[in-house]
Structures are given as structure tokens and as C-alpha cells.
Image: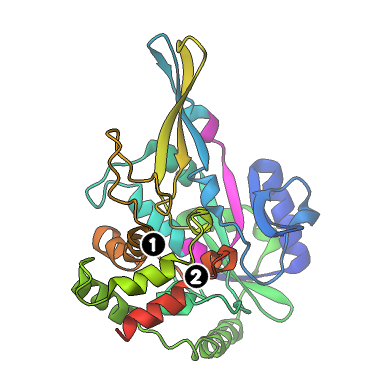
Amino acid sequence: MILLTIDRESLLKFLDKLKREAELIAPVQRLGGATFEQIKDIDEVNFLEGNPLSSPKQFFFPQTDELFQFRKGVFSFKEEAERKRRILFGIRPCDLAALEFSDRFFSSEHGGYEDIYYWIRRRNTLLVGINCLEPEESCFCFLCGSGPFARRGYDLQLTPLENFYLVEVGSSQGEKLVSTYSDFFSPASPGDRREKEILEEKLEGKFSHKRIELKKVTSRLLEDGFSGAVIENEFWEEIGNHCLDCGGCNYICPTCTCFSIMDKTDRNIEVGERMRIWDSCNFSGFTRMASGANPGENKRDRIKRRFFCKLLYSQENQGLLGCVGCGRCWKVCYGEIDILKVAGEIQVK
């Protein structure tokens, strides 16, 4: 692996160069917290510790996405608009893991199909990540194997050291990028690598109080099989009573991929657009059928299905845990439903 270093001033100049040649997306501090946005001015980039409240999922799988337009039976697609080159800077390890999950979901690897809308954006985006030195109290990425240091999935990965960043090159695209802008980088020393390893060892200790074995949780759910044989319905009833059906946990989650399809048309239904929009499995109408029947009408079963999806079904279908430990869902939940606390209670059932 190629290891380099870059100081803060050079990093800003490097990003400014990238901004001129591609669409640069990075964390920006707003009144409600940090969020990923397209950068117009390089001074907007937020280098503070902590994960942005919103994940970069929206840049690959937009909340509202036009699939095609139609006019009296003639269809037109807009693939060209999404072929622009993009650099996503400041993505944290948990969100890199979430992108790996989305890559599998939107690909044909596991019996599905390749989603062209997702992959046009994905293949035209370079990922420049930053390892976390100060995980938030709500984070449990270490338990999910997704952080606080990234192992894969990046083109470039930065680790903040005392006066500079250690830069790891993770792909041929990343290698091409540092080669093109080699003036901004310097070779790393063995001491730099060791300093990163020491930091990583210290950080792992910060998660020692969160003693939950997610493999055991998965096993308990597998034994239960959604039948209530192991985990009584009252358990899910109690959690469901805290849920306000707002959908915030789904919309903020970097691995939630549920969507619905709708058509927007003119009054004569001759011209329109087919739209894909995010949906939430916590909504009572999520499973409603055309006949009016709704197998998911019970809030208890909806909340139960969400946890089964995150902790069991995702592993069965995508081979990856559907939770990356970012803690965002707990942050936005008005009912204060903590997925880690729920997992801990399942573990001892």
C-alpha cells in the first residue's frame, strides 16, 4: 500500500484544485449540524471530529429521483446528467461500510439486478475518507466491524496525526489522483505508520464498555424466526409504543434502501415523470396492497421487522450487517429507541 503525508495547508490547496475539476462534496457545518453538500468555497469544508448528521447516501440514491420522462408513450432517460465526475471528501469509515452494503444491494451479485441509476453515480465518484479519532457516545462502529478506522472501500483514506495527515492509497483511481497532484504530498515514514497503529489501539479501548456481541444477537433472531418463539411479542410491543411513525430512523440511516415509485403527470396524463422516492418500513402504508389488505398494519410487527432487517435479513441477503454503528437513528428518534440497547436486550433473551 502507498503511504504518503499531507499537511493541512496543502490539503486545502489540493481540495481547491479538485473543486475546479470535479464536483466536490464534503461536510459543511450548518445550524442543525454538519451535512454533506457540494462545496462552492473551500473554506466551507468542516474538518471537525464527529460524523455529519446526514450520510452521503443521498448522492448515490437521492431521496427523490427521476427515473425517466414520458410523453404519449415516448420515453426519455437522463443518464448523461449523472455522468459528471465527483469527489466525496470527509466520508467516515461507517459510511464507507454503508456504501459497501448499498453496492451489494444495488448490484446483481446476490440475485438482484444492477441499478443503473445508482451505479452511474457510484462509478463516477472518488471517495476520500477520514478515520475517526473521537467517536461520539452514540457510535458503536467497532462492534459492527465498520470503524473507527477504515479497512477498505476508499480511494484515499486520511488519518489525522499531530501536524499532518497520513494518506493511504486504496485503489488505482486513488493512485492516479495522488500521482496527478504529487506536489502536495510527501512520502510517509515507518514512524508515521506506527503512530497510526498506536492511535487505532487506543481508540478500540473507547468501545470496551459497549459489550454486545452482535453475532449472538443475530443467532437469537434466527432462532426466533419472527414467530415469537424466543422473543416474546410484548418485547416488541413495548418498543413499538415509543415509535411515532416519523420515519426519521429510515431516512437518516445510511443503509436503508426501501423506496416507492410514483408518477407525476399533467392534467391530461400525457406528459409526466416516473419518480423513485425513499420510503419507510415503519410507515403503516408501507405494506398496504392494492386491495386494501395490510399485513404490516400492526406497529409492533413493523418495528420488529426493522430490527430483523438490520440485524438478520441483511446478512442473509447481502452478506453484511445492515447496521454500521453510526448511531444516527438514535440521535433523531423522538421516542429515544436505541438500536444498541435493543440489541443488548435481545442478546440476553
**Residue 153 at least partly seen:** no
The residue labelled by disc 2 is 337
Q: Secondary structure at mark 1?
A: helix
Q: Residues in magenta?
A: 81-96
Residue 12, percent from left and from top: 75, 59
Residue at the spot of label 1? 303
Q: Nearer the viewer, residue 165 or 304?
A: 304
Give amino acid for label 2: Ile
Residue drawn at (51%, 58%), measured in percent from left and top? Answer: 244
Tell me the quarter of the image containing the C terminus: bottom left
Percent across and percent down for residue 289 are: 29, 38
* 165 with respect to 83 (left or right): right
Q: Is residue 275 magenta?
A: no
Q: In screen coordinates, is 203 left or right of 238?
A: right
In the image, what residue occupies the spot 27% across and 49% down? 295
Numbered mark located on residue 229 in the image? none
Badge 1: how crowded within 10 Å, few (<14), some, or many (20+)? Answer: many
> Viewer-proximal residue, 109 or 219?
219
**Residue at the image point whose x is 66% and y is 65% from the top:** 185
Kind of element beneath mark 2: loop
